Image (tube, rainbow, N blue to C red):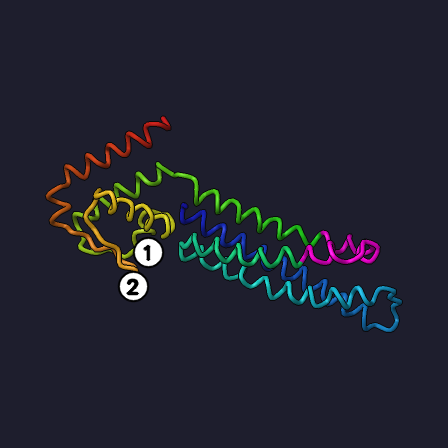
């Protein structure tokens, strides 16, 4: 994924988290006020007493979504998807729980309060779907840029940091890693990746000696994948 787009998604995700946090916090405090204010008649104190812990739990469950908002700035698409999925998988069932399990007559007077709370989770779910689609969709034109950059770097540098390469190609680190590992497996380049240092080590001598062969493999790949889209 394009690095700038990924960062904008991180910003959008963070503001959705803040908005939902404020919305749920306000709902929680408002219910506390209704329960403990002796001047207000409240016929469904039991319902509020049941819902209060759920709202408190929802606020705790928001934090994986907050963490998911950080990873786009480190160009890490996989961890963004992971934490967003964890947050929503806990958040949404907790929000739906009282609507499904409580008697309808107990919940119905408060539907006007509860339903707006689903607006921002819907936005967050939309962001998650977009990220997953973007991850699984083949981006052959972006791959072509990455492959060409890798071929050029492999004849000049003995090692190269993953993060630096991601910035150079303006894509996320997971995408870079996936493309380069495939190139290594198919002998399209002579290199090795080290997880502990997050660096690629290039065999400059082998890559220079066989640059014609490597370029021919790249051109064959480009014709096979890019040519289909023209």
Residue 105 on the magenta span: yes
Residue for point 78% across, 65% down: 48
Per the image, the residue denoted by label 2 is 196
- Count residues near mark 1 (Cα–Cα under 10 Å), then give few for <14, some for 14-19, many for 20+: some
Q: What is the tally of numbered marks visible in this picture?
A: 2
Q: Quadrant of the image for the C terminus? A: top left
Q: Earlier in the sequence, mark 1 or mark 2?
A: 1
Residue 77, relative to residue 215: is it above or below?
A: below
**Residue 94, x across and y down, in percent:** 66, 59
Q: Which residues are magenta?
A: 95-115
Per the image, the residue denoted by label 1 is 163
Q: Nearer the viewer, mark 1 or mark 2?
A: 2
Direction from residue 162 to residue 49 in the image, left or right: right
**Residue 95, x across and y down, in percent:** 67, 57
Direction from residue 154 to residue 77 in the image, left or right: right
103, 71: nearer the viewer: 103
**Residue 110, x across and y down, in percent:** 79, 56
Residue 162 on the magenta span: no
Q: CA distance from mark 1 to mark 2?
A: 13 Å
71, 89: nearer the viewer: 89
Task: Kindly identify which numbered label has been placed on residue 91.
Answer: none
Considering the whole magenta stretch, tell me its main secondary structure.
helix
């Amino acid at each position: 994924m394009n690095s700038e787009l990924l960062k904008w998604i991180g910003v959008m995700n963070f503001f959705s988290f803040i908005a939902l946090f404020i919305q749920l916090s306000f709902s929680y405090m408002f219910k506390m006020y209704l329960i403990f204010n002796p001047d207000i008649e409240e016929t469904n104190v039991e319902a509020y007493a049941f819902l209060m812990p759920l709202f408190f739990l929802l606020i705790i469950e928001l934090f994986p979504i907050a963490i998911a908002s950080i990873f786009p700035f480190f160009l890490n698409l996989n961890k963004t998807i992971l934490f967003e999925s964890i947050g929503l998988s806990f958040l949404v069932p907790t929000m739906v729980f009282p609507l499904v399990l409580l008697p309808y007559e107990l919940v119905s007077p408060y539907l006007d309060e509860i339903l707006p709370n689903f607006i921002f989770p819907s936005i967050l779910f939309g962001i998650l779907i977009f990220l997953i689609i973007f991850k699984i969709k083949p981006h052959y034109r972006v791959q072509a840029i990455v492959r060409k950059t890798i071929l050029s770097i492999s004849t000049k540098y003995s090692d190269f940091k993953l993060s630096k390469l991601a910035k150079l190609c303006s894509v996320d680190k997971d995408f870079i890693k996936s493309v380069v590992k495939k190139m290594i497996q198919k002998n399209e380049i002579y290199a090795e990746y080290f997880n502990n240092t997050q660096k690629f080590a290039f065999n400059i001598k082998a890559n220079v000696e066989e640059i014609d062969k490597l370029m021919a493999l790249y051109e064959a790949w480009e014709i096979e994948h890019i040519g289909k889209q023209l």
